[in-house]
Amino acid sequence: ANRWDGPVGMSGGAGGRTAAEEYLGRPMDDTEWEMLARTTYAEATGDPEEQAAVMSVILNRVKADGYPDSITEVVNAPNQFQAVTGTSANGRQPSSRFKAFNDEVLAQFETEVTPRLTNFLDQNWLNFTAGNTAAYGEGTNVDFLDQVNNSDGSARIGGTVFGTVR
């Protein structure tokens, strides 16, 4: 699999909600924007490049055939975004990081994360997963890491592996 060798840390370009809407190709309502930012924050580490890549996967799913057409529906799909939908071990509750999202985090996203979305325009990734098998809890499919890792155009950014499993 190919490894990410792009301009890590590059933050040029427009930011904020406008950058995410441009990437998506349509306006978002306030709920979609908040769910996009909250989910990204909860699913990624604090690395802005990794966060932008996670955000791109969510937006790519909204644009792709075979997925719902709204961000809220994409991130609430069963067994897809554990930080949003929870696990059987935590009573199907959103993660503490999802709940901790606030205006300060949003401001950081608008200046540090969304400007990096342009780094991923050509990737079209539809999947991401933890790059460390220790992150897989009971009842999760650790084989998914190998599937994403071995997909064409896969890349590791921070602690996450990105790609598209067909």
Image (cartoon, rainbow, N blue to C red):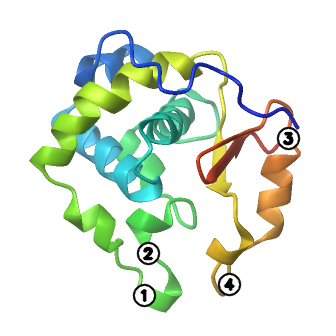
Question: What is the C-alpha distance between the residues marked 1 and 4?
Answer: 12 Å
The image shows residue 121, relative to residue 129, as above or below, that is above
Q: Nearer the viewer, residue 91 or 70?
A: 91
How many residues crowd mark 4 within 10 Å: few (<14), some (14–19), many (20+)? few
Q: Residue at x 65, y 16 (%)?
A: 122
- The amino acid beneath tag 3 is Ser
Q: Which secondary structure lies at badge 4?
A: loop
Q: Which secondary structure lies at badge 3?
A: loop
Q: Give the quadrant of the C terminus.
A: top right
Give the x, y percent position of residue 74.
Answer: 47, 47
Confirm or deny contact between disc 1 and disc 2 (CB under 8 A). Answer: yes
Asked whether the viewer can see residue 24, the reply is no
Sequence-earlier tag: 2 or 4:
2
Sequence-earlier tag: 1 or 4:
1
Q: With 82 as the anchor, is 15 left or right in this view? A: left
Which residue is identified by label 3?
Answer: 151
Question: What is the C-alpha distance between the residues marked 2 and 4?
Answer: 12 Å
Direction left: furthest residue: 103
Question: What is the C-alpha distance between the residues marked 3 and 4?
Answer: 23 Å
Question: What is the C-alpha distance between the residues marked 2 and 3?
Answer: 26 Å
Sequence-earlier tag: 3 or 4:
4
Question: What is the C-alpha distance between the residues marked 1 and 2?
Answer: 6 Å
Confirm or deny contact between disc 1 and disc 4 (CB under 8 A). Answer: no
Which residue is identified by label 1?
Answer: 90
Q: Which secondary structure lies at badge 2?
A: loop
Which residue is identified by label 4?
Answer: 139
Q: Residue at x 21, y 56 (%)?
A: 101
How many residues crowd mark 2 within 10 Å: few (<14), some (14–19), many (20+)? some
